[in-house]
Image: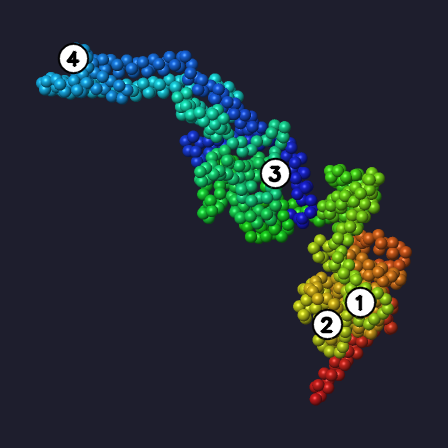
Amino acid sequence: MGDNGSGRLSMVSQYLAEYAADQEAPSSYAYVDNFDNTREPVAIQLPSGEGLSFNKDIEKLIDDLLMTFPAAFESPSYQQKKTSIERRFNQRYNAAIDAVDNQARAHNVVLFRDSESITFLPIRNDQALDEEQFALLPQAERDSFHKHSEELEDYLAEALAELPQWRRTMVEELRQLDNDTISQAIEPLFAALNDKYQHVDDVITYLAEIEKDLAGTIADFLMPSRNNDSRDTSSAKQLLLSEQYLPNILVDTPLEDSGAPVIYEPHPIYQNLFGRIEYVSDQGMLVTNYRRICAGSLHKANGGYLILDAEKILTYPFVWEGLKRALKAGRIEIESPYAELGINTITLKPEVIPLNVKVILIGSRDIYYLLEEMDSEFKEMFRVLADFDDYIPRNADSIGQFATLMSNQARDIGSKPLTTNALRRLIEHSCRLAENQQRLSAHVNECLEIIAEASLLNQQQAEQDSIDQSAIEAALAAREARNGRIAEEILNEMLEGIILIDTDGEAIGKLNGLTVMDIGGSSFGAPARITATVHPGSRGIVDIEREVELGQPIHSKGVMILTGYLGHCYAQQFPLAISASIAMEQSYGHIDGDSASLAELCCLISALTRMPIKQSFAITGSINQYGEVQAIGGVNEKIEGFFNLCAARGLTGQQAVIIPASNKRNLMLKQSVIDAVSQGLFAIYAVADVNEALSLLIGENAGVMNETGDYPEGSINFKVVARLKEISDLASDEDKEAEGS
């Protein structure tokens, strides 16, 4: 788990690729036809790398069959045996007919047969009579002919009573002859395959099933008598045999790619993960067969590692439950999850394939904690957690690896090499992204994108043979210009006086705070005026932002801490009775964070003591109830936001920013700010407590409490105590007057 862009996928993929390279390659799998039930294709397992080889062997077998048949039925040996069988049938039939014919001639009747029937005709002088001649015969002779004809028909029926049996015998003998011929012809074809795959039980079983099924297939499609249709070409026969016998190689690892597979599925919909069955339209009907079964990512990663995006598999329907079901059962079942909804009716039920895979989920911390809370099976199935940090400690090793990564990226995109100064500038930018001088940002994509943009800008300068620091600076400046529209508008409004921010002079109860705005992919700082007013009363400190529901909880917490600080430092000997209002002027949106609490306290003390604050200062920092200044975020953007305003109005050497001392390690400022500080035109002060900030802002000694709990006379804190006691006394007098009345 970790944030996007922190290199999780790249690191996991690289690590697994190296680790899996030394592991055994997984088995290959293929689907073949189930000749007993075509709706349930059979899965066969082959050694790694032999799937495509087996497919080519079956293709060669089909080619050999087409060359062998129908030629095997046209051989002299087959024709002689076939003629002999047919001759025996004809001899039996002719003998029976001849016996009937001899019996008929004894009664002056001749047997006449054509292709479809047998009839009896009267004869005279060895000549058969036609109907007219038969009608001229005496009645007695005609009656005698009819009588003998009936007797002869009964005799014929008796003689041919066994004719169906003779015919069945002939058909069986011909079928046996065909089967023997087929067996003799294909035996050498299968012998070589059986020898080659004798160590693969599934293949031996499948070859036996093919051999058994071929008898019917050859008899139906490859017999000479069945090939009278001129449209039944060799290509059509080959297609038919391929659709029936050629295996569907689901997954096969090439021999040159040794090791376990590492698969990343970027689009884990159900079909892409578990496989699918495709359909084709045949005369308006959707049909399919085992050859239209397609592998999913689980098939490809079987025996290895599968990397998935946790958020995506939770987004697509049925995927999460299907994945858990497959992992728990240890098998991959290709099915349609929409069948129960009536969206699609599956026509195949392929045999399940054993599943042995390690699944790595990559996601945010929110997704991990959501799954941990909502799914009781999650921790049981995904037991190992790797939490990716957003930062990398800055040391010699990490800097070297970072420089290598940046140089490799420049090479991979075909750009010119990076100079040492360019790499140094990228390291500074990475530290700025991390907001820490001693850390590099784990979001390396930001720097990789800068290199790509610098390379594009560098192409316009043909004389340059490398990418130097100026190209990196240009890319950063271009990015800031594209994203800086809102920051520029705010700055212009300050310069035009629409947003009231002073950068010189002094004022009571007014102070420049510092804010950071994150809009889209842009983050920038801007000063904001904080004001405070104080008057006698007992309402306490009123946060105007909170009252109008613009102040978020953390901001409101920071304001409420002010009361605790005032009571702890100033009101130990009298009750704290004060009414004050604090507001962030010209702010019309929600405000969150406590980084303005130091500024609000200083502004409140200015209003309380009527001591003016230097408007050339801006301040940021949070405080606790004891006045200790605490670190805040976005310190670089805040400083640069106020600096840009001062620079636009003209640097006087009096402008400065006050930050928490604990934020010094976070300073990664732009070169323009660094140059101005070094020239004495701008200053940055780091303070550890409120007294240091007050001394800088007001220009007088804040004062430190002595052992008796008193502040030095004339100090800022002394005046605060005096003013608070004055307000407390006023409140006490008002209470006494109210009691007297």
Determine whether label 4 and label 1 are within 8 Å by CB: no
Foreground label between 3 and 4: 4
Q: Residue furthest top?
A: 125
Foreground label between 4 and 1: 4
- Alpha carbon distance from label 3 to label 2: 60 Å
Residue 426: x and y in percent read: 79, 46
Tell me, for residue 263, which label it has, or none: 3
Question: Which one is earlier in the sequence, the residue at label 4 or at label 2?
Answer: 4
- Alpha carbon distance from label 3 to label 4: 96 Å
Q: Is residue 313 above or below residue 196?
A: below
Viewer-nearest residue: 94 or 732: 94
- Alpha carbon distance from label 2 to label 1: 29 Å
Question: Which residue is the site of mark 4?
Answer: 124
Viewer-nearest residue: 569 or 558: 558
Secondary structure at badge 2 equals strand
Secondary structure at badge 1 equals loop
